[in-house]
Amino acid sequence: MSTAALINLVRNGGYQVRRRALLTSRLLQDDKRLTAVCQSSTTERRASRFDPDGSGRPATWDAFGIWDNRIDEPILLPPSIKYGKPIPKISLAKVGCASQIGKRKENEDRFDYAQLTDDVLYFAVYDGHGGAAAADFCAKYMEKYIQEFLSQEKNLETVLTKAFLEIDNAFARHAHLSVDATLLNAGTTATVALLRDGIELVVASVGDSRALLCRKGKALKLTIDHTPERKDEKERIRKCGGFVAWNSLGQPHVNGRLAMTRSIGDLDLKNSGVTAEPETKRVQVRGD
């Protein structure tokens, strides 16, 4: 090897050594800076909506503060998204009912509940009088009429009003075709509730069967009794040609016979103002 070639090799080798040393130094400096950043982000943990207190523990429904862990039910996803809060699915398996005959010879009370559609539940109480025929008829057919109008109408108050009037007309046709003349005097109260999306509650009623809502440990009335004691109801009966008479106990009755001003059935009193048109109320169910 010539002297010139040897000198050139040494120069190039020294340059490579210096270059490698410089790269190594820079890598070490970068590594220190990266370690410092990681240590800083570890010691100064930032809060987020999934870790609100910066504790590192995974977020739960309780951490969000919007879920009652006593409710062991699946949530309804579309309504929860629509209303911006978790809404539990109501199971009909947890619906209870009870009836007491009292001093009567025959129990004329009827009740019913069902899942009408994917998002609508149906609950109903019928307290018959003058026999159980009208209450039986409502318990058997009211669900059918509500489903029919649900397919045509979104407003649940309108749905219930139409269903009440239609089932009253249907019972009238049934009674007039029957050989049993006692059906003309049979009637029933009706209190029906529809729950949509687990949150929208609509109640319709005729008569004096009451619906109550428990909220914050207090009972709230969702219905008002239809009796001749109400000034507006008494005036309506009189305008329709009926009258109100008081019995020996001081209780007012329409035409001296019926203790309520609205009902399904009671066909002999329809011309005296006893109507099947319900009063309705809409409320939003809450978790308290």
Image: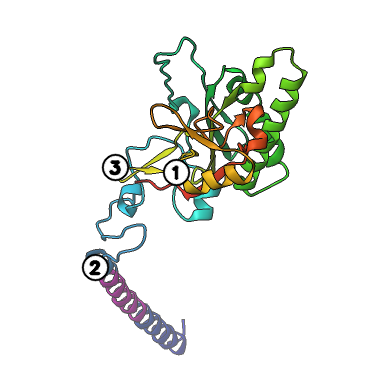
Q: Mark 1 vs mark 3: which is more N-terminal?
A: 3
Based on the displayed image, in which of its 4 quarters is residue 172 positioned? top right
Residue 200 lies, in percent from the top left, at 51, 47
Closer mark to the observer between disc 1 and disc 3: 1
* Residue farthest toward the right in the current orientation of the protein: 177
Identify residue for label 1.
222
Inspect the image, locate mark 1, and give the three-letter code of the amino acid beneath it: Leu
Coordinates of residue 93 in the picture (x, y in percent)? 47, 25
Residue at 46% x, 9% y is 105
* Residue nearer the viewer, 171 or 59: 171
Mark 3 surroundings: few (<14), some (14-19) or many (≥20) residues within 10 A: few
Query: Which stretch appears magenta?
Result: 21-37
Residue lying at 77% horizontally and 19% vertically, measured from the top left: 177
Disc 1 and disc 3 in contact, CB within 8 angstroms: no
Element on which disc 3 rests: loop
Q: Relative to 248, is 180 on the left or the right?
A: right
User: 63 or 133, which lies in front?
Assistant: 133
Provide the residue designation for mark 2.
44
